[in-house]
Image: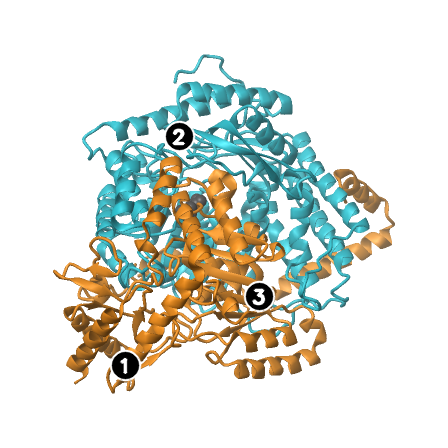
Chain colours: A cyan, B orange
Amino acid sequence: MYLVTLLDGRNQNMVAHTEVSPQVSPEKILTAGECSKTRGSESVRSKGPDVLCEQNEIVNHKKSNHVAVAGSGTVPHPKKKSYKEEDCSLFVAFFTFLSYGVLLLVGYIKEFFVPVTTKEKNREEIELCSPFTNFTIYLSYGVLFFVGYVKEFFYPPSTKEKNREGYVPLYIGFESFYTRNVYRRIQDCWNRAICSVPGAEIDLMERYTPDYGWTIKHTGKTIRCINVGSYNYLGFAENKGPCHDAAEEVTREVGITTSSPRWELGTMEIHRKLESLVAEFLGVEDAITFGMGFATNVLNLPSLLGPGCLVLSDEFNHASLILGLRLSGATVKVFQHNNPEDLEKKLREAIVYGHSRTRRPWKKAVIVVEGIYSMEGSICDLPNLIRIKNKYKAYLYVDEAHSIGALGSHGGGVTDYYGVDPKEVDMHMGTFTKSFGAAGGYIAGSKDLINHLRVTSHAQVYAASMSPPVAQQIITSMVIIMGKDGSTEGRRRIQQLSRNVKYFRQRLRQMGFIVYGHDDSPVVPMILYLIPKISMFVRELTKRGVAGVGVGFPATKITGGRMRFCLSAAHTKEMLDKILKEVDEVGYLTASHYSREPKSQEPIEW
Amino acid sequence: MASQWNVYESFQALLQAGPYHLALEGVLVMCVLWLFTAKKKPSKMVRLTKKEEEDLLADWTPEPLVPQPPPLDHPNLHTRTVYGKAGQYVDLGTGQKLLNLATQSFLNMGERPEVEEAAVTCLHGYGVGSCGPRGFYGTTDVHLNLEERLAAFFNCEAAVLYSYGFSTSASAVPAYAKNGDIIYADECINFALQRGLQASRSRIVYFKHNDPDDLHRLLKEQAIADAKDQKRANATRKFLVVEGVYFNTGEVCALPELVVLRRQYKLRLFLDESVSFGTLGPHCRGITDHFNIPMTEVDLLMCSLELGAGGNGGFCVGTSFVVEHQRLSGLGYCFSASLPPMLAAASIKVVDILEEEGAGLVQQLQDTSTQMHRALTTLHTKVNITGAELSPIKHIRLNESSGDRQSDEAVLRQVVQKAEEYGVAVTVASYLSDREANAPQPSIRITVHKNLTDAQIDTARDALTHAFTDVLG
Ligand SMILES: Cc1ncc(COP(=O)(O)O)c(C=O)c1O
């Protein structure tokens, strides 16, 4: 899914990152691309979608220069020869192909001179993608696009709608080219329905496609798989045990909804209890909670930032952060993933030279990062971020969606992991979807900050408050993690997860796979490079009883196709061994043991 | 250009081309470069010395993170707390149970034990959280089932489920409307829609509240502009965004007139049915059902499940051509964990109920709403009540504003407090007035629940009358 989601998502992300404010000058916008001297492929990724965007706007909008656009300034567009909308598919196909061609060409040339490195900041291993592999990556996309182009030349896709004759087409033909010709063929690897609790093992619903991926049907049978796809880090996705019982009780007591926002009658006792518990858990003064993690970012960043504020945002930040920053109207500069030097350079320059248009000093500067990056498996370099933030009087916003609960000896996230005082981070954000097996998000920090959010956050005023059983699930699981229930269950889970992570990562490396991310991160991306390998891996593993997630362009850069395993405290060593065995076998089938570093053959202890 | 070899060959071909050709190419490249560089700002950036930089850095004093923390007695820092379940009566810790006219559960679904039972049954099977977005094993058969049921309920091809009411319309609109498109929207649309419009970066044209004539005027103006620039018009999508029953005013949308305009001016009609779902139409299907307008007239129907439906999350229905697009482009759909299955299961039960008892439920709610409306019209001489008679949402506004939002709201808050003393829980409609496109006048929002009895309506009227008299004299 992300594959294509992100074709769109990333586009928007890139646009978001670049179009946030009209004040950013063009050369600033491209900084993400420029700084790629060391990491060639980056620039392809970051420039690519922009190229695409431009193409698709030219082709499909033929927009005028004087439409006052909501949010941003006017965007001039080159005049293009007109054609009738109805029979535009040939043009669309042509431009589509052209744009991909340009993309590939730029990418290839770039990587010809600057080979791809799979360098990871927090890890010493640096593996180069061999030129041959690199070539095959582009070749495989080239073939896919070429076939798609030829097919659409002869059988143009119909964009006709019923009951809407004479309307301007709803979709830009370009957007769907990738969907029709690449994603469609492999879409059975995503969106798979399950019919069980997403715990250590899940029941997948078996499906088949009678027509090469255009439609998908369920057979009614199920497949039992070990689950390395869900974000169930501490194994709290359970249908029995204390969390389940407490949630049931609360459902019967107060129902499943409040039907009212927090400002009105949406504040129940349970919400107040939850918020003070979250604050205690994180070791900060106060916390505020919301019904959805995505919305926590999108609906609160606009209350914290505004025009005239400077934001430094990691290039791999989540879509919710990017959207929230865009809606806030702040000026956003993107720095290289997890690269404190790049951050410092850009922050320093931005502060010294002020607002690039008005030349006024910034109102404030905020660094926005994530704790664990869900696609890279990397952990943010918190000590350096704090050093930089203090040196330049900036503020720090850390999205701990994946790291809260999953990192640190007390499950307290990145601050716990690095042993840093939580008060050093100005704004803690996180979600309850992952480690707590619930839903929703929080922001935590100083009393002033939270009070400010209580009276300005959009979600407090316009959205129904968190569902009570969900809140109870969080409370109970958090109490267990903190050991307040008097047991050592929380400790046990945290230790189990951390041992699982060390064991699994080391074994994968030893087998000769390239594994990204930090050694302690429960998100384990394993590099496969090629789209066909991703789909084959997912399918083969499913057949063998392992449910994992494949990710490819545009969720990653073109040369970054990967499998992603999310480990859980619910996994036992036997499960991990089975996963590893199957991964190894499928790895041989697909020739994916890319690592060429020498490996010690010493057995690895769990 | 399909493969490397083409690239390589063209490169070779380029090398073998004659010198004139190369020279020409060179000139072209220079032109392109010049174009790029010429766009840069004319003034050369002055490079500062290290020392100057350090001084500037030391000089810079940023604002505090929160420049003006709210005063500690800010009313919204001290929201009321609900003890136990908010049903027909609600316990706000004041010692007595208050008649609930504040939470937006018009259909009293929270008091149906079968809904809770459905949630608990699902909880036994699936736990609470789904632990992943829809694409990564976050889809359960419960979600698929609910989507199917909702689509069938509306006689539509497809439905897509969101995990948060607010994010439904806020994500759906920008999935279609893009930079360069035009969105016509009612000036009183709810805040979630406004955020959706903002995220789309389209041109937004607001027309007068529920006034098809004003919309027609704007459309005619646009038609004249379009005639001058046909090329652009052919590429500009036009959307019409309205609500079935307006949350901010309680008015019922003049859909029949809008549908005519939609056809005439080729607009895409996006309808938010958050309030009207379950409250209008013989089959509970909302405004289209109410006016007997076929669903084909509507391009996309967006709806939150957090109001009348007594659930969590939201959904969109329409043709699969339109709706399926959101599975790849609806940001709140793709990048967020799916709705906890137990909450989806509860909503399936609600759909069951609506299918079985739809007509009766709607009739009862509309009768109660009408009765309440009439009871409230003679409340006090200094206030008026807005909203359609059959709408379950009503706003009581001051006839004469003091000119200052804050003091108006303070007056209304006093009334709310007094009403509590007289045994009725109501609420001041909450707005972030500085964020709203057209901030509605401060009001007390009354929500009518289906199960209100005549006696309770009388209680409500008397309590509010006393409360207003106490405060306004
Ligand atoms: C960094 C980050 N922030 C926010 C979210 C959204 O959280 P939720 O799924 O609770 O909406 C995610 C989820 O994928 C995430 O990875």
Q: Given the image, what chain letter belongs to the residue carrying mark 3? A: B
Dot 3 amino acid type = Val
What residue did someone put label 3 on?
A: B298
Q: Residues within 10 Å of mark 2 (few under 14, many from 20)?
A: many
What residue did someone put label 1 on?
A: B404
- The residue closer to the viewer here, A214 or A603, is A214
Residue closest to the far left: B95
Whether label 2 lies within 8 Å of ligand 1 gets the answer no
Whether label 3 lies within 8 Å of ligand 1 gets the answer no
Counting every numbered tag in the picture gives 3
Residue closest to the far right: B18
- The residue closer to the viewer here, A552 or B305, is B305
On screen, residue B448 above or below A346: below
Q: In this image, B284 relative to B24: left or right?
A: left
Disc 2 and disc 3: Cα gap in Å? Answer: 45 Å
Q: Secondary structure at mark 2?
A: loop
Q: Secondary structure at mark 1?
A: loop
- Of badges 1 and 3, the one in the foreground is 3
Dot 1 amino acid type = Asp
